[in-house]
Amino acid sequence: MNTLSGLNPQQQKAVEYVGGPQLIFAGAGSGKTKVITHKIAYLIQSGKVMPQNILAVTFTNKAAQELRERVEGFVGRQSALIRIGTFHSICARILRREIEYLEGYNRHFSIYDETDQKQLMKKIIRDNDFDLEGFSPANVLSRISYLKNWLTGPEDFSPKPGDRFNLIVKKLYPLYQKALKTSNALDFDDLLLLPLRIFRKNDSILEKYRLKYQYILVDEYQDTNKPQFDLIDLLAKEHRQVCVVGDDDQSIYSWRGANVENILKFDAHYPECKVFKLEQNYRSTNNILNAASKVVANNRNRAVKKLWSDKPKGELLVKIESDSDYDEAAAIAANIQREIIRNKRVFRDFAVLYRTNAQTRVLEEIFRRNNIPYNIVGGVKFYERKEIKDILAYFTVLANPRDDVSLKRILNFPPRGIGNVTQNEFEKYAKAKGITLYEALAHVDLLEISNRAMKAVHGFLDALNNIRSARESLGFEEWSRVIIDELGLRRYYKEQGGEEAIQRLANIDELLNDISEYCSTVDNADLEGYLEKVSLITNIDVWEDKKNAVSLMTLHSAKGLEFPVVFICGLNQGLFPLERNNNEKALEEERRLFYVGLTRAMDKVFLSTAQRRNRAGEVQYLPESMFLNEIPRELIETGNLREGITSATRQPRTSRRSSNKIYQGTTGKSKSITAGANVSHKIFGIGKVLSITGYGDGAKLKIHFRSCGTKIIVAKFVSPV
């Protein structure tokens, strides 16, 4: 197959260039994956690079699988020699081989997800009698993750005096890292940081991987963080054969450390870099592209580019103006039903995108009442269901006995008489002796616990030893079935009875199906490899894109996807864009997020806003999003269709404390202030009202002042302008 056929002139030039560092700005829908596929095939078929010397990095397993399948169509079995994967999967593979160069770890390490991390942090807080002073373990973990993404270790972090939260983080950060290491466990950030540490400490290991990966391609480069940038730079520093592909206008992950400057300044870091721009869009109509381009052009920090298409202008974007969030959801449902009837669409043609997960509640309620099937991306994942987490915890302990978090999960499941009191005794003993919980179990005869509990612990250890022995004679797939029977999990759920138990048994069968599929598609399939695969799965990887249902997802989750019809809801100031205290960088990222939402649509876009919304138990009046006003008027029409739609039987009544008007009777004059109006304050000057909570002179106004940002002001202290 000709690797250059089917490419437009710019795509072909990008594929053929192999002369050093290369930056490809690939606009939304411009055939980015196609270019990467053809480039890999071109490198191999032209004989410029051997397949085993190519490293291709993506950001999701779904994207990696798609790329692998496409490349196989060009080069056949040689595609198996190419290393294609996410940053995290590639780093995990490196660590399985090299982590023992770091003291205190071994290759059987666990990978902790968010739930595991929270359990570990709660244990640290409890063991050290720590007071979080109103903050949550999740807050602390989020901050630690942010610090790791900027390569700030516990010893490098120096909060300002008086910064309560960061001073708490400063104390817990080293304890968290120590606990991870004791458990021979890594969090997602460590998967990136530890290979860097190994490469910097051991030149011979770095050189081995430099020789192995002689040509490196990185997809979605705009979303790389500092560790990812440094990893690629270390590997490519000598041969400088690196091709990065991305779109700065789609950089939307700064909250997890992504730095848009990595792509904007790539050519400064590699002065000999050759830059290509892919601007022809193959996805959306020109009206959609023009709207998206006009919006994102308001950002100052971006590379200049403009998408264009050979497709027709298409339909205008539709603006839906509703009174409440319930009316908004009903209007969305009505328009979905109309599109199905008039344009012969099916439910899977639609995506409803929103800024925050909290917005799904009203949408779900209205969709259920109107018999509209839907699928939420980012709901409870299969591997996070209790019965699945329990089995995976058994797997994890058998691979890594040092993992206290997983061991605590299974110690008394199924119930075997090892209650909380007994578990606490073992934890105290482990802490006093400086050993793991698993090691403490072996000293059961030294503890003052009941004979029943002592017998249960011996039984638990015997069961684990029997299962561990079986691993030596059985393949992973057969062994996984044995463990479930050996532990009596099926018997336990059958005895429980009821619909919930039936569902849990069905999920266990589905897990065994998943293991069977894994073993049939992976060479040398083993326990550690399966646990790694499960740990690195994302929301998008398990998205049921074949199901005939409307997709509900956050705008962040929608990146990389496309749908014939897209609804972007909640377009109100303070919700989208979220309030970020007049932070220009944050506002630009919110605008990029809106751009991502618009460019997911192939044929039609609906943009919805509601005058009032229920937020934190209060009815608030929010002006419409500034982004709506950045779309040229000639590209938008207004529609409010709701015929035949069942709204909620009980819509939230407008609270007497909440109004979009404030009546200030103390002056003797009837003055009114509405959300979106400009007001004047004696000290802060002129500002715009973002939302209103309450009624009359005592109402509280959220106002964005030009002089000092956003503040909450009592109504009687401001005047209309």
Image (tube, rainbow, N blue to C red):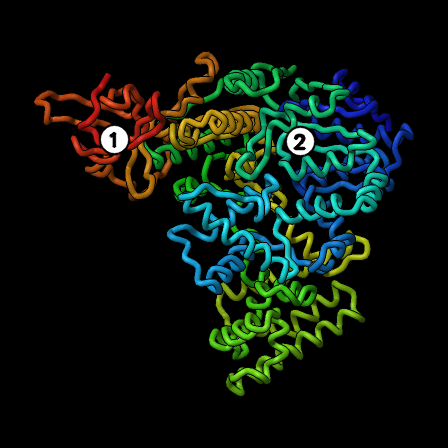
192 shown above or below 13: below
Provide the residue designation for mark 1.
713
Q: Amino acid at mark 2?
A: Tyr
Q: Residue at x 69, y 48 (%)?
A: 194
410 shown above or below 696: below
Q: Residue at x 43, y 46 (%)?
A: 165
Q: Amino acid at mark 1?
A: Ile
Q: Where residue 642 sits: x, y (%)?
A: 37, 30
Report which quarter residue 406 is drawn in. bottom right
Q: Counting other residues with Cα less than 10 Å from the Cα at mark 1, is it few (<14), some (14-19), or many (20 or more)?
A: some
Q: Secondary structure at mark 2?
A: helix
Q: Residue furthest front?
A: 161
Q: Where residue 307 sits: x, y (%)?
A: 62, 17
Q: Where residue 172 sits: x, y (%)?
A: 51, 54
Q: If the image is split into quadrants, where does the N terminus sit?
A: top right
Horizontal arrangement in the rendering, residue 479 relative to residue 600 (left or right): right
Q: Is residue 682 visible?
A: yes
Horizontal arrangement in the rendering, residue 269 relative to residue 82 (left or right): left
Q: Residue furthest right?
A: 47
197 shown above or below 276: below
Q: Residue at x 61, y 27 (%)?
A: 261
Q: Where residue 693 sits: x, y (%)?
A: 25, 35
Provide the residue designation for mark 2.
221
